[in-house]
Image (tube, helix red, strand yellow):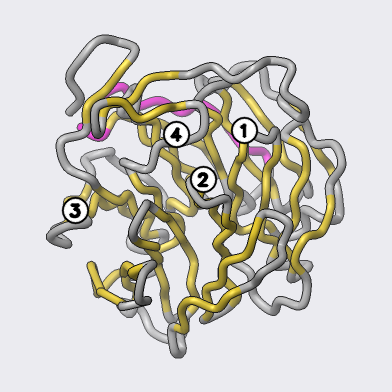
Amino acid sequence: MYQGDPGSSNISEPFLLVADRYGEIILQVNITSGSTTTLPLGDVGQPAALDYDPLTDYVYWADDLNDKIHRARRDGSGRETILDITSDNSVFCLALDHAGGDIYWTDEDEHTISVAKMNGSSTRTLLTSSAVRSPYDLVLDPRNGLMYWADNGNDKIYRAAMDGSNPATIITGLSKPRAVTIDYREDRLYYSDGSHMYSSDLLGNDIQQLLYEDGKTVRGIAVDENYVYWSSSWSASPWQGKVGMLSKSNLTKTVLVEGLTYPFGIRLSTAAPPGVTTVNGNRFKITLLPSSLSGRV
């Protein structure tokens, strides 16, 4: 648990959060030892996407089975349903804007990207578009007022302003894009296409292949200063899902967890999110971004 004043938090051990969709659990993975803990969140349904707020210790997840978005602290306290989704089995992406206090999510059936406050209030639709045909992952860049998503239906990576304006295609020619994230230190985009993982600049140029997972689909990506983390699964057989990490310096692969059913989204606790600056190692505090920043809600 965290210690400190209400405006800051301390994380004693770095960890990944992993949504195992068909295993119907959310795991905490120690990135040093690979040890795992199933978070005591109660019935999580089928968690298809998740995010984490280091300031409050809240885990947010989209329950694809019951069409709801929930949140709870890692110890299970404070659990509540913050959003009921009217569509069936359609929310595979969610992302937190920590500085703005907002949660973003996509709806495959409605072809929308929406936003609300982190408690589920003030809901509104930002974008309704054919570019949101079958979104599988969403990442925010509040520094630049932008959001990016991987759309498996259109086989493309898109970006738009965080208010939903100016949607544009930045990467084409894909066959199964499932994951996307940003390395905010290096201004690089990381994304998956089937069994492969790539990186590019934030305009979709300078594409580099980083990983090939033979026979599996890369479904989640997270990144820190030294490593890229991924989740993958093999749809032909259960219990073949795994979580691994890849050295940025030499592309050495290390498997952290095996035997998962169907791992989807992953999130890293110690990667300081946009709008939250790192102070004294693992200590976090809010740094509000300018309200006039182009593209912000």
Q: How far apart are marks 4 and 2 (CA)?
A: 27 Å
Q: How far apart are marks 4 and 1 (CA)?
A: 27 Å
Q: Mark 1 points at which residue?
A: 143
The type of residue carrying mark 4 is: His
First reached walking from the N terminus: tag 4 or tag 2: 4
First reached walking from the N terminus: tag 1 or tag 3: 3
Residue 30: assigned label: 3
Q: Where is residue 112 in the image (x, y as percent from the top left)?
A: 76, 43
Residue 70: assigned label: 4
Judged by depth in the image, the label closer to the viewer, 4 or 3, is 3
* The C terminus, quarter of image: top right
Is residue 153 visible in this depiction of the protein? yes
Mark 1–mark 2 contact, CB under 8 Å?
Answer: yes
Is residue 76 visible in this depiction of the protein? no
User: Which stretch did the figure color magenta?
Assistant: 74-86
Q: What element carries label 4?
A: strand
In-front residue for pair 95/227: 227
First reached walking from the N terminus: tag 2 or tag 3: 3
Q: How far apart are marks 1 and 3 (CA)?
A: 29 Å
The type of residue carrying mark 3 is: Asn
Q: Position of residue 192 (x, y in %)?
A: 56, 70
